[in-house]
Amino acid sequence: MYDLILKNVHRFIELTPEEKKLFISLLKPKKVYKRQLLFQEGNIAHYQYFVTKGCLRTYFIDNKGQEHNVQFAIEDWWTGDMHGFLTQKESRFNIIAIEDSEMLSIDRPSMEELYQKVPKFNSYFRQLLQNAFISFQDRILSGMSETAEERYVNFRKKYPSMDKRIPQNQIASFLGITPESLSRVRKNMTNKNRKS
């Protein structure tokens, strides 16, 4: 159950057996089933989640009732509302399972305990936040400067396994295009591949 998260941590920092034991003791297992909400807007984000199995999506609903996908999370990814987690203000986001999913969660007091007792976890979570920020900036630039086809091609390169696991209308929302536009992009790409 903990192998995947320990491998994830190991990519950034080395832990002693005692540090691993403490870290694991602070994690709580959580399961959600397909189409079940893990987290709902209006609530306070008390946890961050590491996905060990399954696929989830984070989205918000605008004033017109339209859903906008902001993140997908699969195995070996962290997810949650970081803004709400850090500010303890009501969240604008929902997190729902696309597949039956299993996670390990950590709450704020446990994270603070981890920082105090194993200071190198400050470095681990800082590096995760830096990577998330870089990804966020890349996504903004992509949305402002790339065509729908370029965005889709880059999505498939960056997240090769997700294209088969996530419904196309949700990928379209994530890319900031309509499902019809994504359908045209996919059709054009298929036609190009046949000709080459």
Image: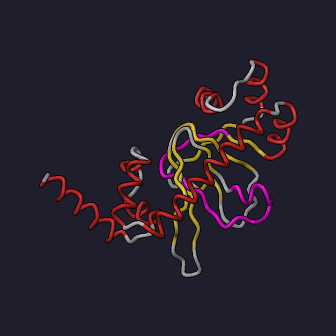
Q: Residue at x 59, y 80 (%)?
A: 63
Q: Nearer the viewer, residue 14 or 161?
A: 14
Residue 77 image-quadrant placement:
top right
Q: In this image, 97 relative to 49: left or right? A: left
What colouring method underlies this structural image? secondary structure
* Residue 25, above or below 181: above
Q: In this image, 12 relative to 67: left or right? A: right
Dividing the image into 4 quarters, which one contains the N terminus? top right
* Residue 19, above or below 81: above
Which residue appears farthest toward the bottom when viewing the image? Answer: 64
* Residue 135, above or below 184: above
Q: Residue at x 73, y 29 (%)?
A: 24
Q: Is residue 40 magenta?
A: no
Total number of numbered labels? 0
Q: Nearer the viewer, residue 39 or 173?
A: 173
Q: Residue at x 73, y 49 (%)?
A: 47
Q: In this image, 103 relative to 172: left or right? A: right
Q: Give x and y (percent) for residue 117.
A: 86, 31
Residue 13 image-quadrant placement:
top right
Which residue appears farthest toward the left when viewing the image? Answer: 195
Q: Give x and y (percent) for residue 176.
A: 45, 69
Which residue appears farthest toward the top when viewing the image? Answer: 17
Q: Give x and y (percent) for residue 112.
A: 84, 42
Residue 116 image-quadrant placement:
top right
Q: Which residues are magenta?
A: 82-104
Q: Residue at x 36, y 48 (%)?
A: 164
Q: Give x and y (percent) for residue 66.
A: 51, 75
Q: Is residue 84 magenta?
A: yes
